[in-house]
Image: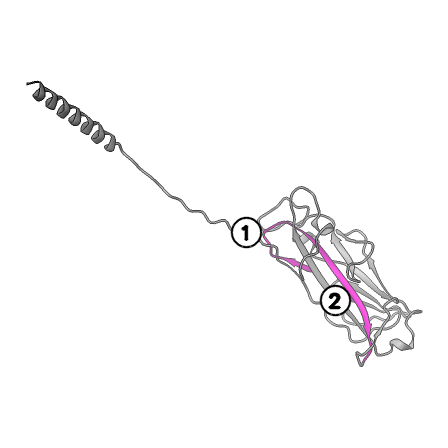
Amino acid sequence: MLQRKMLMSIASVLVLVALIAGATMAWFTDSETVAATFTAGTVDVGITDPTDIDIVNPGDIINFGAEEDAGYNYVRGQGSYDRELQITYEGSKAAYVRVLVGAGWATEDEESVLPNTNISIQDVAGDNWILLPGQVDGKYVFELNGILNGSGEGFGDFDLADVANLPFTVTINGAGTGNAYQGAALDMDFEVQAIQAANNGTNPFNQYVPET
């Protein structure tokens, strides 16, 4: 009799455990998974290619950043040319921008290089570009005086439309340009560089030279 009661008690306990387990499994459940793609920003800068000048003479002045004129203007030894030079920017990130300007002479046979000490490059006052003292790799450096906005970041100082034009002048010193320069070519090259800007005001050009 006692054994039968014990068996019934055990059976009751098992039924209760099963009910509890069944009730636990009966709770409503749900889950959801989402995915996100994070795309890196871009820094994409370019520069226009100014048209070549057929002939230059001692005392000539070449004005960059201005609409190209009809040709050579000769006034008492002071030749003047206009050549467009503008930067482009299609990056999404705000950026610091600078332009490196190189200038040198090469003879007709291109076997020797003449000194470029008779060439001077001057900044144009009143714009948003600064001609820095000294040179980088033998080139003059024009740096944008602030941050250029990107298509996806607007904390910078300038929009491209306000600073695309880079004006400066190149003067060929008459007294320093002797007969050795007859037939020589004035070769100029322009390199634009951009580095993503952080909104902490630190210009990374002071510590880093971008790949070319």
What's drawn in magenta, residue-wise? 82-108
The alpha-carbon separation of the residues under discs 1 and 2 comes to: 31 Å
Q: Residue at x 64, y 45 (%)?
A: 198
Q: Amino acid at mark 2?
A: Asp
**Is 140 left, or right, of 160 in this rendering?**
right
The x, y position of residue 47, in whole percent, is 68, 62
The single residue placed furthest to the right in the displayed view is: 175
Query: Can I make out residue 85 in this image?
Result: no
Q: Quadrant of residue 83?
A: bottom right
Which comes sooner in the sequence, label 1 or label 2? 1
Amino acid type for the residue under numbered disc 1: Ala
What predominant SS class does the magenta segment belong to? strand
Question: 10 Å neighbourhood of mark 2: few (<14), some, or many (≥20)?
Answer: few
Please say if the residues under marks 1 and 2 sit with CB atoms less than 8 Å apart.
Answer: no
Q: Which mark is residue 209?
A: none
The answer to which of 2 and 18 lies nearer the viewer is 2
* Residue at the limit of the structure toward the bottom, as seen here: 109
Q: Position of residue 201 (x, y in %)?
A: 69, 43
Give the residue furthest to the top.
Answer: 2
- Mark 2 secondary-structure assignment: strand
Residue occupying image coordinates x 81% and y 53%: 125
Crowd around label 1: few <14 · some 14–19 · many ≥20 (10 Å): few
Quadrant position of the N terminus in the picture: top left
* Display colour scheme: one colour
Q: Which residue is mark 1?
A: 40
Q: Is residue 124 left or right of residue 48?
A: right
Is residue 203 one of those drawn in magenta? Answer: no
Residue 107 part of the magenta segment: yes
| Quarter residue 5 falls in | top left
List the residue tagged with mark 2.
Answer: 189
SS of the residue under disc 1: loop
**Front residue (pair 130, 158):** 130
